[in-house]
Amino acid sequence: MKKNSPFKILLGLFLSMIFFVSNSQDFDYETYDNWILFESQKRFVMFNINSKIVDNATVKPTFVIDVFKDNDGSLGIRLNDGDVYTYNKDRNYIQLDFIVDDSEIFGYTSRVIESNADDWETEIKLTRMEDEPSLFDLFDLMKKGENIYVQTTGSGDPKVWSFELEGFSDAYTMISKKWNEWKQKQKKDNPFKKKDNNPFSNVASNSVNPEFQSYLDSYLIIAENSGVDLSFIYNYPVKIQFDNLPKDSEGSDDYLGFALGKDDDELVHIVIDYQYWSSMNDLQKTQLLYHELSHDILNAKHVSDETHLMHPNSEFKNIPMLIVAMTQIFKQFNESF
């Protein structure tokens, strides 16, 4: 991580155009290779200004990810810093597609909107529909990838750019951390936020909420019976708690749990959406915890096989079937070493 890198003046100019403040050179921002992280009054932002034209384009937009300072941590993706399309209020929907390295295509409905910046008139804003891919799945691939390719399809031939992903994983981890710290500070500064309808809001930090302890214990027992010793996790912080999880820009409720400690072997940090948890049966709760624990402790990735526990939408008929699936994951984990 670097702060106040040599292109400070250019970056300050870009930030001033985005956030409409004059003293942009005093902004506190952080750079992670190709990605820059910045906090404004209403949101956290990470962006990449180093786009490369691949096909048909004449301008080089900036790839922007917004995490808004609201109760849900709403997510947004934008392309700005250049007029890719002109604005037409009657025909402003376009297709926005992403490929990470040679992955499948992540396709989203998007809009051309009018911009408030002085140096460009329009920007492209992703508008995720309910049946379109999860943004978190896209971000998971971006954390491991080398390049993301972006294609817009509107009037004329599709336009394609690429952005390097070096530094994205670190920037993404940091923006998640900053949003969670901001959320906790709101609760601390405003005592009324502690008196909401969430019965789990008083759980101490760096601890496992008692609601989750039996699921964690059973997970570790299955691991031990499968020849995998995970007792080392107690040498480091173990934190499993309830919270309101970030949602995408359309408020979609796709995210039941999130493994913030994934790819960090010295931390287990899982957050679960308490509203969903309260509506689940024991089988669903067990599956959710085992899924997120496998992300966090084993660094397991999502898979395309719908019968596999690590598929985002897998469903099991009973606990014994779930245990068999978990045993298979531990077997695969053993074979990887």
Image (cartoon, rainbow, N blue to C red):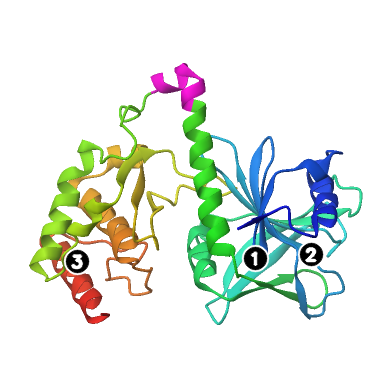
In the image: residue 81, left or right of residue 111:
right
Residue at image mark 1: 33
Three-letter code, disc 3: Met
Q: Is residue 179 shown left or right of residue 204?
A: right
Outermost residue toward the right? 118
Measuring from the top left, give residue 181's x and y in whole percent. Answer: 50, 38
Residue beneath disc 2? 61
Residue 195 drawn in magenta = yes
Which one is in front, 17 or 323? Answer: 17
Question: SS for tag 3?
Answer: helix
Judging by the rendered image, the residue that carries numbered circle 3 is 326
**Nearest the camera: 73 or 236?**
236
* Mark sitting earlier along the chain (2/1): 1
Percent coordinates x, y for residue 67 in the rendering: 60, 46
Residue span colored magenta: 187-196
Q: Quadrant of residue 87?
A: bottom right
| Residue at position x 59%, y 56% in the image | 128
- Residue 126 rendering spot, x and y as whole percentages: 66, 57
Could you tell me how far apart the alpha carbons at marks 1 and 3 are, in whole angstroms?
37 Å
Tell me the kind of residue under disc 1. Asp
Depth check: 208 or 132 in front? 208
Which comes sooner in the sequence, label 1 or label 3?
1
